[in-house]
Image (tube, rainbow, N blue to C red):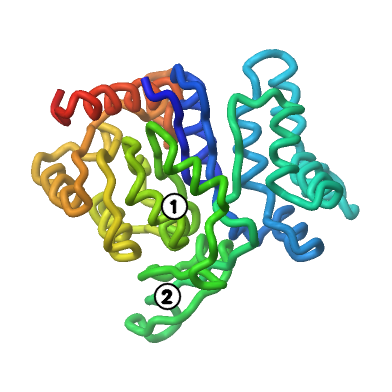
């Protein structure tokens, strides 16, 4: 098994990947997290304190908390949101803890490392950039002119748009990647990208030149994990291969080794061949793996099962080091 695993993403998709990583026998897990959230508690902290939005970072810390009574208490506490109608309403405890430690220590990376020590985390959580970013999308299909392309700025606005997202960019453009995040990608045995909101949690990583370059140059086994379904708003109507085309559109030099997709997502041989052809453009083979969670009653839910995903990553890594993608 890989000795070190670095997972790129944000939100619930990254949460599930990190949980899968806990089931692998690895010495080090590192989460590299997007920093463009502008909604809810994170957006308020970002606006009022000028800090990196902490929400996705908090979720990653919760995912890596120890699987014992104390660890589960920390996970619950980090994720707990205050109710009511006062100034604290809607804030997550973990967001406030990260923000407070950042003020005290003068560094969000140090703050995250401190929370990781408190929670006896399985790994380390790092921002992809050490400054808050904004996402702007080119969106078609808004208003009375369906072919007109208009800019939509802000993660929440992009994620909830009713139009068709064509591409996204970051502001400021070409931001520097976090030094520790870049090092974690370069030194890993396996790096994962996705699943998650494609335009707001996945693609932003490859728009940071230092992160994209590290992904291209690392000797790690590089794995893209595809979503189980297209998302309303961001990727409504997208085929699986179009998700890959969007990666190459935003980072033409990107190369990965393997793409994992749940085996129930595509049933026809024709559609599977389309995906394989798209994957080949970035140097990857496709692994159709049973990674979808079930509801306990014979049905499926739209969430990756951490145990199943861990098994899939283990199989992909074994094939990778053997040099035979079909093994």
Residue 138 numbered tag: 2
Task: Pinpoint residue 210: horizontal percent, then vertical percent.
Answer: 46, 58
Residue position for label 1:
202
Q: How many badges with numbers are in the image?
A: 2
> Is disc 1 in contact with disc 2, using a CB cutoff of under 8 Å?
no
Task: Pinpoint residue 178: horizontal percent, then vertical percent.
Answer: 57, 53
Above or below for 47 versus 40: below
* Residue at screen point 70% across, 20% down: 71
Circle 1: is it few (<14), some (14-19), or many (20+) Cα within 10 Å? many
Do we see residue 171 in this rendering?
A: yes
Q: Quadrant of residue 212?
A: bottom left
Q: Nearer the viewer, mark 1 or mark 2?
A: 1
Quarter placement of the N terminus: top left
Question: SS for tag 1?
Answer: helix
Q: Quadrant of residue 74?
A: top right
Is 323 displayed left or right of 205 in the figure? left
Do we see residue 233 in this rendering?
A: no
Q: Nearer the viewer, residue 257 or 181?
A: 181
Mark toward the start of the polypeptide (1 vs 2): 2
Is 211 displayed left or right of 120 in the figure? left
Question: SS for tag 2?
Answer: strand
Task: Pinpoint residue 199: horizontal percent, then vertical percent.
Answer: 44, 59
Q: Nearer the viewer, residue 50 or 13?
A: 50
Quarter placement of the C terminus: top left
Above or below for 146 versus 326: below
């Amino acid at each position: 098994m890989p000795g070190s695993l670095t997972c790129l993403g944000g939100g619930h998709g990254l949460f599930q990947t990190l949980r899968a990583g806990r089931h692998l026998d690895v010495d080090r897990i590192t989460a590299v997290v997007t920093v463009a959230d502008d909604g809810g508690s994170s957006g308020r902290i970002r606006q009022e304190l000028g800090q990196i939005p902490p929400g996705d970072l908090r979720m990653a810390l919760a995912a890596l908390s120890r699987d014992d009574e104390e660890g589960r208490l920390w996970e619950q506490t980090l994720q707990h949101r205050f109710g009511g109608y006062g100034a604290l309403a809607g804030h997550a405890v973990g967001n406030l803890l990260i923000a407070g430690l950042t003020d005290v220590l003068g560094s969000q990376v140090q703050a995250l490392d401190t929370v990781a020590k408190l929670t006896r985390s399985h790994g380390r959580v790092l921002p992809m950039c050490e400054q808050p970013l904004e996402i702007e999308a080119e969106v078609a299909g808004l208003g009375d002119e369906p072919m007109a392309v208009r800019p939509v700025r802000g993660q929440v606005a992009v994620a909830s748009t009713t139009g068709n997202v064509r591409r996204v960019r970051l502001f400021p453009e070409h931001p520097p990647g976090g030094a520790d995040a870049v090092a974690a990608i370069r030194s890993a045995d396996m790096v994962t990208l996705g699943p998650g909101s494609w335009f707001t949690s996945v693609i932003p990583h490859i728009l940071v030149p230092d992160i994209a370059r590290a992904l291209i140059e690392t000797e790690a086994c590089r794995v893209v994990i595809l979503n189980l379904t297209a998302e309303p708003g961001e990727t409504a109507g997208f085929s699986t291969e179009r998700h890959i085309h969007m990666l190459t559109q935003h980072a033409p030099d990107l190369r990965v080794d393997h793409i994992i997709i749940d085996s129930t997502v595509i049933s026809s041989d024709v559609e599977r061949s389309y995906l394989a052809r798209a994957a080949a453009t970035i140097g990857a083979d496709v692994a159709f793996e049973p990674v979808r969670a079930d509801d306990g009653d014979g049905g499926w839910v739209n969430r990756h099962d951490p145990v199943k995903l861990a098994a899939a990553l283990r199989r992909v890594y074994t094939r990778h080091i053997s040099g035979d993608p079909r093994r």
